[in-house]
Amino acid sequence: MKKVIKRGFATLGIALMLGMQLSTAVFAEGLETNATLRGVPLVFEGNCSYQTQIENIGWQDWKSKMSISGTSEKGLRLEGIRIKISDIENLGVSYQTHVQNLGWQDWVDNGEMSGTEGDGLRLEGVRIKLDGSEAWKYDIYYQVHVENVGWMDWVKNGELAGTEGKSYRLEGIKIVVLPKGSVPPVNTGSVKNVILMISDGCGSNELLATNYYTTGEAEAQVYEQFPVELHMSTYSHNEIGMGDDLASVYDPKTIWNNFETLKNLPTDSAAAATAMSTGTKTYNAALGKDENGLDLVNICEDFEAQNKATGVITSVEFSHATPAGFVAHNASRQKYSEIANEMIRDSQTDVIMGAGNPMYDNNGEIRTEIEDKNYNYVGGKETWESLVAGQLGNDADNDGIIENWNLIQTKDAFESLTTGETPERVIGVPEVYETLQYNREGDVKADPYVVSPNENVPTLDVMTKGALNVLDNQENGFFLMVEGGAIDWAGHGNAGGRLVEEEVDFNNSVNAVCEWVEKNSSWSETMVIVTGDHETGYLTGTAGVYDEVINNGKGNMPTMAWNSGDHTNQLIPLFAKGPGSELLLYAANGSDPVKGSYIDNTEIVLAIRNLLK
């Protein structure tokens, strides 16, 4: 895959320098070369969709890609089902259902109803198979949720899912079509922990530049060897009220015709975090809300509903867009005090860590005068003083007892948290204002580490180790989001040296996570996803040309050109390892001539939710 990407960069660079459009042949070569990913066939490139009739509710919306149709744990029976295949000629789907008191129904196909509608008779079993001359190329997998049993194992190609003659009703179903030879889906409930690591603002060139500076090699990170390696689209629905959202949608057929296109109406971090945490696109600035301003359920709330622990940590303010997007619900990311109070006072989150300390400035020096605005990132003066006093919390685990936050601030306290016994809930606010390091004084354009770092704050990997030590007290498992937030700030500032500093800090935190998995958990129960939320700065090797940054050897800054001070809509890297990580492969039905296979940012949470009970 790496060779394909590099050839794509070179071809595209030549085309843009000559003012040419990419030819059809170049697109065809890229698509054909990317037919497999590390030996695993790509996802079925058609669309398999399905809908169910639920008792007393009626027909549900059409679902696809292993989304649940029906319900689970709600005691509502399925009464009918429709399934259809599109986008691939000579391929269809046939299915039959076992109906209460009636037995097996005749086979039907391509969108016809099987079962009943309005007769009050439950579905008890289902068989599904592909037909047509192209059926030999694919497997259709399906999994059902059975009354009092839960999710059963995945079956395929006409096998029975559910029961026959045992009077158990079906309550939900998931379906996916995969190319022959693909890894089968992992059973629901197979994941214990999920750790999502977001390098805010990091695209392919930001990662490459850091690797070149630190090692002189293109692939230097442990996560670059993860078994799943893809790219991800990040576009949003732009600012609320805009009439045409399509201007920002990533379209590989047109995106490479003009170097400027990737600058069109990019996402912001709030919309990107909301997409990743809820599975729903929204407008820029929205946190946990859809385009109509309605609250969305985020992945932390999904984990909390299953009595799992949750946490968010970042190298910037904890009420900033990315961590807030996994916890809070607010129409505007700018309402920091409101957001902080929801995170602290209302959420069930167990660990929150990030900057925003009102008592210190960006150099980690204590303030001589504190204004009301300095408390903004932590929810106001009253909230902060209550945290300091250890008198603020809520009933986070629904046991009828208030669980107060334990506030830590000093570097020593963060380091102490990495080992030994821990409090039940921890909020960590280091002794610095906006960022751990990026906003410190000195030449922001200097090479890495020329400007002495703040010495009184923890590194992101120390914060990560401490968060893991708290969260793993929950035997049911946990979800943790770790953000390298100031990589984005470096992109906005076109500050290559501080970009490298921030990306190194993030990479160290990934290493800490992988070490924790191998020492305290296992890759069979913990899934780790490493990605970004968007690219910032439009970093390339040559101004006005989409090519790679140029390696000048270890310890030397690579040759690099910033083409923007804002976000872009280019595809960004994604890496994954652990149980169910192949679900991201199944979702990767996008194919780009330069980047290869890609998913959309809304599909991360879809994969994770398919692994929960």
Image (cartoon, grey):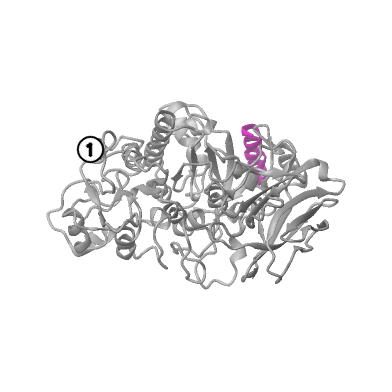
* Farthest residue, direction right: 133
Q: Residue at x 82, y 56 (%)?
A: 107
> How many numbered marks appear?
1
Q: Quadrant of the image for the N terminus?
A: top right
Q: Is residue 171 above or below residue 540?
A: below
Quadrant in which residue 97 is drawn = bottom right
Residue 570 visible (yes or no): no
Amino acid at circle 1: Glu
Front-most of residues 227 and 217: 227
Label 1 neighbour load within 10 Å: few <14, some 14-19, many 20+: few
Residue 514 visible (yes or no): yes
Q: Position of residue 125 (x, y in %)?
A: 71, 53
Q: Relative to 358, is 535 on the left or the right?
A: right
**Tag 1 secondary structure:** loop
* Predominant SS along the magenta part: helix
Front-most of residues 337 and 443: 337
Q: Position of residue 234 (x, y in %)?
A: 54, 53
Q: Is residue 513 magenta?
A: no
Front-most of residues 88 and 164: 164
Q: Is residue 409 above or below residue 326?
A: above
Q: Relative to 235, is 404 on the left or the right?
A: left
Q: Position of residue 546 (x, y in %)?
A: 59, 44
Q: Which residue is mark 1?
A: 455
Q: Which residues are magenta?
A: 1-18
Q: Position of residue 390 (x, y in %)?
A: 18, 53
Q: Residue at x 55, y 64 (%)?
A: 237
Q: Relative to 172, is 101 on the left or the right?
A: right
Front-most of residues 60 and 41: 60
